[in-house]
Image (cartoon, coloured by chain):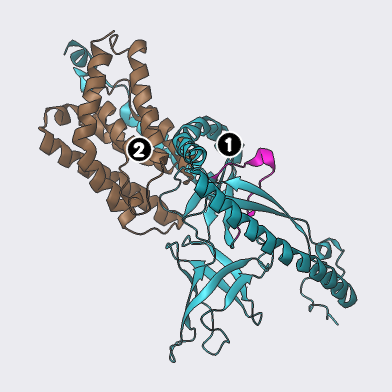
Chain colours: A cyan, B brown
Amino acid sequence: MVASRTDSSNPARIPALGVRLIVLLFASIILMVLDHRQNHLGAVRQTIGAAVYPLQVIVDAPFRLWEWVRDSTADRNQLQLELSRLQVERLLTNARLQRMTALEAENARLRDLLDARAQVRDEVRVAEIMAVDANPYRHNIVIDIGEREGAYDGQSIVDVTGVIGQIIETGLTTSQAMLISDPSHSLPVEVNRNGLRTIANGTGEFGRLVLPFVTNNADIRPGDLLVTSGLGGAFPAGYPVAVVDTVNRIPQEPFADVTATPAAALDQVREVMLIWSSPEPRDEEPRDKKPGDEEPNDE
Amino acid sequence: MSRAGRAGRLPVILTIILSLMLMVMPLPDWAMPFRPDWVALTLIYWAMMLPRTWSVGTAWLIGIVLDVAQGTILGQHALALCFIVFITVRFHLLMRVFPMQQLTVTVFAILALYQFVLFWINGVAGVDAPLVNYWGPVISGALFWPVVSLLFSGVRQRVQHGR
């Protein structure tokens, strides 16, 4: 134990421990204030994130490898089954798509007639969720698309069944995204059936959202599909979010107790889609009216 | 100090990198709140055994890296790790002579303090999380401590005596 004696024979000699602690504590506090209040530290995060990236890749690698092994050793019957299933699915989807093209054209014509803003086409790109756990206090995921591919803060993420969440932080090659089930996440939605607008909040459970601001007499019932309303500006309109589960009207309370199940299986997805919404034409038109004026009447 | 000099740093750095990897390793949902704080355990160990080389400065840097990896507020883990490493270094002589049970209880207390700092910062920043997210790592961390310290004492023998 020679070394340990030389290392610590005189604890008082550890140079200026208290001073260093205080300096570092101050540094952390300044960092936290800058990061939390002003979001000035994107570049710092990205630089350090580049160093963290290899770690994430190494952690993710065994899961990738396992998937690859499973895929490449899958039994022939199983593959054939899946192939036929996919073929049927493709036929059905294609059939639906045909109608969709016609409907889209019709929709655009009608919108032209109404002089409403044009429906924007969204550009999508597939991203993979990395097998890496992020923030223990939040429902976050790490995806393998970053700023280099054009991801940006606040970008919406969906999967084939519905909205997943949005990007809250972009690195160079990876991004962190917050799921809609996070307790601090709110999402403007509307009831698909009648256009009733409200807000869906996360609860911290993957399978449950709450709609805290639905009045008691609102027309909403179990089974209603909630879609994004596009009002917050973050999410493009019209993507399915959740299905209303229970509506509990309490007479003496102003708001009903409404819960919904997310349309996407938030804890099971592996592949997600990032959406680039093109800028909306109406916002680019110069506005003569002052912000305080009434909304122009759409005829 | 010369013995635990340059050549001896690499194994310690490797344990720290390993602990960082364990922090981002995916766990099933039910186990997530009980992920031991591997980085905190590792830093407590090295701060206790080699306080001159691995002290608050290291803790701060590793904390920043952890903040980036986990997407928490930049500086949150840095502050908390700095704080507990400071306490560990202050009491490292005392902690070294503790029998394992007593040391485990001490580590439990240090981890609780660590989570409290994190909890407090989250509270100020308005991040809401269920309480099990704070107690889980403390309990599992204390349970894993004997294993971790046993493993690391092997590494330490190598750092201090081996070449």
* Residue at numbered disc 2: B81
Q: Residue furthest right?
A: A113
| Start-end of magenta stretch | A143-160
Could you tell me residue A204's position as x and y percent? 43, 62
Read off the chain for label 1. A
- Give the class, few, some or many, for how many residues have Cα within 10 Å of label 1's Cα (few <14, many ≥20): many
Could you tell me residue A182's position as x and y percent? 48, 60
Could you tell me residue A255's position as x and y percent? 49, 83
| Quadrant housing the N terminus of chain B | top left
Q: Relative to A215, is A99 on the left or the right?
A: right
Residue B21: quadrant of the picture? top left
Is residue A149 on the magenta stretch? yes
Residue at horizontal 30 percent and vertical 31 percent from the top: B42
* Residue at numbered disc 1: A46
Amino acid type shown at disc 1:
Gln
Is A22 situated above or below A273?
A: above
Residue B140: quadrant of the picture? top left
Residue at horizontal 17 percent and vertical 26 percent from the top: B93
Of residue A193 and residue B9, the one placed in the foreground of this image is A193
What is the magenta segment's predominant secondary structure?
Answer: loop
Is A165 situated above or below A287?
A: above
Is residue B131 on the magenta stretch? no
Q: Residue furthest front?
A: A77
Amino acid type shown at disc 2:
Leu
Is B160 situated above or below B147?
A: above
Read off the chain for label 2. B
Callout 2–callout 1 Cβ contact below 8 Å:
no
Is A266 situated above or below B80?
A: below
* Element assignment for label 1: helix
Q: Relative to B45, is A299 on the left or the right?
A: right
Of residue A286 and residue A188, the one placed in the foreground of this image is A188
